[in-house]
Image: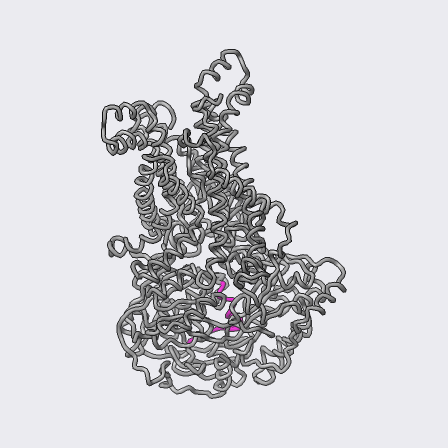
Amino acid sequence: MATLELSMQEDVPAPVGRKRKLGLLFWVASIWLAVILVLAILAPLLPLQNPTDMDMLERRAAFSSEHWLGTDGLGRDELARLIFGARVSLTVGLIAPMIGLGIGGALGLLAGYFRGRCETLMVGSMDVLLAFPPLIFALAVTAYLGQSIPNLTIILGVLGIPAFMRVARAATLTLARREFVIAAEALGASHARILLRELLPNVILPLLAFFLLGVAVTIVVEGALSFLGLGVPPPMASWGSMIGEGRDSLDVAPRLAFLPAAGLFLTVLAFNLVGDTMRALTDPRQGAL
Amino acid sequence: MTNIAAAACKRAPIFLVAAFALLPLAEPAQAQKSGGSITVGQELDIPGFDPLKVGVYDSSGYTAAAAIFDTLVTLDDKGDAAPKLAESWTHSDDYKSWTFKLRKGVKFHDGTPFNAQAFKENFDRQKDPANKCRCAFYITNVKEVLAPDEYTIVYNLTDPSVNLPATMSIQSTNNVVHSPTAWKTKGDDYNRNPVGTGPYILKSWTAGDRMVLEKNPDYWDKGRPYLDRIVLKPLPDAQSRFASLQSGEVDIIWDDENDADNILKAQKDSKLTVHTYKGSGAQVYAFNTKVAPFDDVRVRQALVMSIDRPKMSQAISNGLSRPATNPYGEGSWVKCKDDGALPYDLEKAKALIKDYGKPVEFKMLATATPRGRMIGQVLQQFWKRAGANMEIDQVDQATIPSRAFSRQFQLTPWRIVDLADPDPQMYANFRTGSPVALAGFSDPELDKLLDHARVTADVGQRTEDYCAISRLINKEAIWFWTFQNTYYALSSAKLKGFPKIYNGVIDVSNTWLE
Amino acid sequence: MLNFVARRLLGMLPVLLAVSLLTFLIASLLPGDLAFVILGDQATPENVAALRHDMGLDQPLWWRYLSWLGHVLQGDLGRSFRTGQTVLQAVSERIPVSLELMLMAEFIGLLIGVPLAIACAARAGGAFDRFMTGSAFAMLSMPSFLLAILLIYLFAVELHWLPATGYVPFTEEPLANLRFFVLPALTLALAEWPGIMRVLRSDMIATLQEDYIALAKAKGLKPSRILFVHALKPSSLTLVTVTGINIGRLLGGTLIVESIFALPGIGRLLVGAIYTRDLVILQGVVLLVACGFVIVNFIVDMLYAVLDPRIRHGHA
């Protein structure tokens, strides 16, 4: 599982000066994301063919007016599957990192602020999670709880917790030494108040930037799990599972693998362009306080 | 096939097979060449060879077993039972006792002499209830094996078996002969250090990587084997397995019809040869008739009638899969004028489900493999058209038997493999009280037919019994069959002498390179 | 320093214990067990019960865990019921493969990632920088199972430069061994370099904004010298972190790449153990992998301490 962990730590922001203006790319990326999101949300209302209806004698058909993007290996409409696949990929890709963000972020914040035993314990438990082979975890959960989108989301979410925790802790560690926190402590503010009012608003920014990266990684990892039979249950499609199915007909119809891969690439790229720009805008070093 | 069992039947009444009747497997026009080595690309990693440890061999294990071990009997290229470690055999009039005369002067790789005692020890070890061998399941019909003298063994059966020699030709845990000295001295390590009398000796084996087999210089069949070395490698991914064949890393690979694109590509490639064998048996599915909605025959019939097999064959294998209407297939000697197959009739299916009244919703077990998912989705689609809602329950291989035996399923895939006689599998799958009678369906008429077919020697009568059984099962729709068994191997065109894929076993032990 | 080492080492024990307990719990939740796998067609309730008893599977979970732990403390990781291999045999056959694959992948990843990061950082926001950042995401969104088969078709089937699948031990044929590892390592590395590049690039851009770089520029030092000596060196900590994380992650094996290229690595061993419910192997291998992870973490911490003495007092 080459990609099962959110491994990219980006504590340091990209250069700022150039991205102050949002730039054309940012807008193109945002529009792409908006279009994909709208298509995904409205998929059931759109005049699409049923993504699971098969025409078994029309397998891997070429582009036509009936099937705009042709049909897949079982004769299902490729366009409909791409759009319904976006729905699944984005649902999993957005919700799983939220779990990581919520739990990992909170743990990291607490660990970075309270230090001491609490920190040791949390870092230790994250080490346990990291040392445990992720695939075994995924296999066991699906074998026990069954295969469904919620279960898949939980697996990917839990696997993302350590990374979010690291980011949150690192950010809290630097912030906790800054003047405004020390001042609040001196004024006798409660721990809860300092955590929620002073630290959280500042820690949330790098976390959100990291979140966007997490979305991208999660969508790719879901594909890997689908390839291993641990992803979304068929006949539902996700971009990842479509790439996996298309892989078997690379010779005959390479588009079946490359269309969803292209969708994935553009979306991942767009998420990161937007993420980078937002991080640049919200970099604490720019005195955003 | 057919030939296996049909021919074996023809031959069965002949009391003595000439001692020198070992037929060359290849056509005489081709000159065998000695030397060289080949690499075989397999699907699975082999866990080991000790029957007590592994129970049964899988498709990959068979290939290795065919090279390391010998069986008493083999099948020649016409499908007739031919001598191997046994030189001849006779049977009693009631077919309940078979006597085999063993080949003399054969030694195991470790020097232990092969004789009746060694064979009997092999059998007793598997039969011993204390050993709880999974393999014992397939020898329940053998009461005992006796060794009256050094080169004679006697099989005493509980029921008549007219086809015994042919059914003993598959290189299964029950039929290959291990060196008793080896398993006694090696203990736990024997599993991965097997010793047989076969044409190849295990040289080295790295788990998950490759098994190197070297030519046995003292093989009893002089002049054989031809290749100096055989390397077996597990290549789990179908696409890269085929790419390895194309690039020349391996010389022959296991394949199945769901990999149709590659099979068709190989057919067009002059550097490759496609080996096909149409075996008996079928890919089958069992309904659990004890639970709703399958406790109602209308639902079962409706589901069976809504499957359009030719279309399904197109979808899953580019039309390579051969539709099945009974559990025996064209490869079996059981030929039915009327097997009672339910026709494809979507309207009738819809009507039956409407008649049932309640919504039909259920889960079907499927292996978490591309193959399992593809077939599952196609069935799902057919049933959706008939108004039934199936959910695919993807599980790993280990889960399917455990779910099946604990009856925690509604519908499960199963397999009836290519065997020379239908009795062992039909009896196990459908006789009331058998642990593998997955449907949980009990019918006195069915039991009577199964019992009768088992103890009858007359082929015509048995055929009638098995056809009646098929009609009964098809009518009640407790199991259904989708496609007949077709076995595939793809090889380099230079590889010669590859025999028919009897029982689905890729046996390369008598091949040579041109 | 000694104190620091001892503290870190002690801190690992609870992690290992927790990992082994977690494995035990998770494995016991799986439906079906080894008895079913071994018995197959013969898995009648009576047979299963008898075999479970023979294998000790009918004991309560906590008892099985404690007795396993007792054996492990005596250095006995057990023997598979299925293959008869000991855990140490099974792992020692496979560790060299996973280790070599991991090191080669990391090496290639650094080889691609580091120069690109420097080039991007030198002209941050320029056309090259933007192009490479985009390509990095293209690589990231290409799942390894697709990438692997594309590489095989290109380099093995079409060009015949490299073998498609397979493996020989380094000790037997060093050159052939390296050839077998190129494609799988490349598949992994193509997913690794974007991460390495992005992290290092951001780090260097930040460093290049520091005052001492401005000073060096003012002194008239050559730009290449500034880039490689003054800017790259402070980023070594980041590189160590990223490499450490990647190695830790790859330790558990890379099932997909191992399966496609038919490499006998840890990933296939682990998943095979799960599929056949071979708990002895599963338990032992997870424990050893966790040990490896902990050791890598430890080495990374040590490297931190060596590279930056201030860290010895705080927490890395």
Query: Viewer-proximal residue, A72 or C243?
Result: A72
Instruction: Say if A97 sits above or below B93 in the image.
Output: above
Q: Can residue C240 be seen in this view?
A: no
Q: Where is residue C32 in the image (x, y as percent from the top left)?
A: 54, 53
**Quadrant in which the C terminus of chain C appears:** top left
| Relative horizontal placement of residue B15, taking residue B436 as reference (left or right) | left
Looking at the picture, the colour scheme in use is one colour
**Which portion, as a residue range, is magenta?**
B134-147
Q: Where is residue A248 in the image (x, y as percent from the top left)?
A: 47, 60
Instruction: Say if B297 sits above or below C63 in the image.
Output: below
Q: Where is residue C239 in the image (x, y as percent from the top left)?
A: 33, 35
**Quadrant in which the N terminus of chain C appears:** top left
Q: Where is residue C35 in the image (x, y as percent from the top left)?
A: 51, 55
Residue B183: name its quadrant: bottom left
| Relative horizontal placement of residue A53, taking residue B248 as reference (left or right) | right
Query: Viewer-proximal residue, A129 or B107?
Result: A129
Q: Which residue is drawn at 49% across and 27% down?
A: A203
- Whether residue B140 appears in magenta in the rendering, the answer is yes
